[in-house]
Amino acid sequence: MRLDPLSLGFNLQQLISFHCSSLRYEREIKNLVLWLENQKIRRYKIEERGPLQAEGEQWRANFDKYCRDLASPIVDGAMAEKLEWLIGYAISLEYADNAEKYRGQTAQNISQTIVNVPKVESSNPLDNLDFESSDFKKGVIALAQILNITPHPDHLVTLKAVSKVVRERLNQDALDNPSNIIVKGKPFPFQEADLGFDMGDYVLNEAAKILRLLYIHDLRNLQTHINETIVAVQSITADPKTDTKLGQVGR
């Protein structure tokens, strides 16, 4: 019997609603399998679940063994088919453990409950925006052009870049003291920098240089935050005052 995950009281709908294209990403698949095993299936002991956290081909081999251990009928099917069976199996276990709780939860009852939920009108105008409409996309591109941001093929990625620029460069502190926010100096000629390895493609090499610089920039920011934290803690714990009466010289 196939059960509607909405009637089971745990959040499998989000897992089932993966776009087909997302199933290509091994990390998402691995997280899904781990969540099902840790929370619902529990076929292995905790100390035996390590193979489900492997990487690459080893993880795929371990996942196939995991499916065999669960007696999955789908051996040579696509990954989406294996995951669909795995989720269905987790649902059946959840139902078996809480049969009394879910016995009256039919698809019709769930649908009726959803229909009867009062609709709350939001006063936030952003909630009424269609983020996939052509007008919205044109607006994002226009903002990017105003801020001299190169548009990304995905307008939502462009929107994130716009948001970051506005947050960091157009906040009140930046407007009042731009010299403290906008770093000035001699541009670094990253095109001339030695990457240390060759990826066999000029464009990939240039992208790798940029990613390395961004990583170093993030590390410097992290180090700055660490130093600020140390100074803040020392200002609380350090006591520069010394009571000379407590001192003792010699025996």
Image (cartoon, helix red, strand yellow):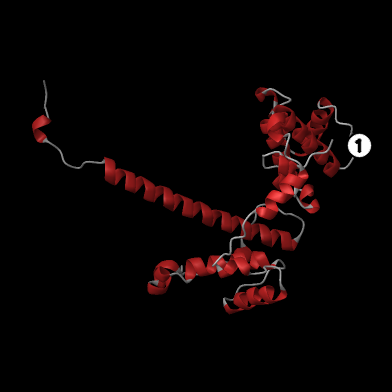
Residue 71 position (above or below residue 107): above
Residue lying furthest left in this view? 245
**Viewer-proximal residue among 122 and 137:** 122
Q: Which residue does the numbered mark 1 point to in the structure image?
A: 76
Residue 118 position (above or below residue 180): above
Say whether residue 187 is visible.
no
Q: In x, y percent, where is residue 109? A: 73, 45
Residue at x 70%, y 30% (from the top left corner): 100
Question: In the image, 214: left or right of 182?
Answer: right
Which image quarter holds the N terminus? top right
Question: In the image, 218: left or right of 84?
Answer: left
Q: Total marks drawn?
A: 1
Residue 183 position (above or below residue 101): below
> Which secondary structure lies at badge 1?
loop
Residue at x 77%, y 56% (from the top left corner): 200
Q: In x, y percent, where is residue 180? A: 40, 67
Residue lying furthest right in this view? 76
Q: In x, y percent, where is residue 67? A: 82, 31
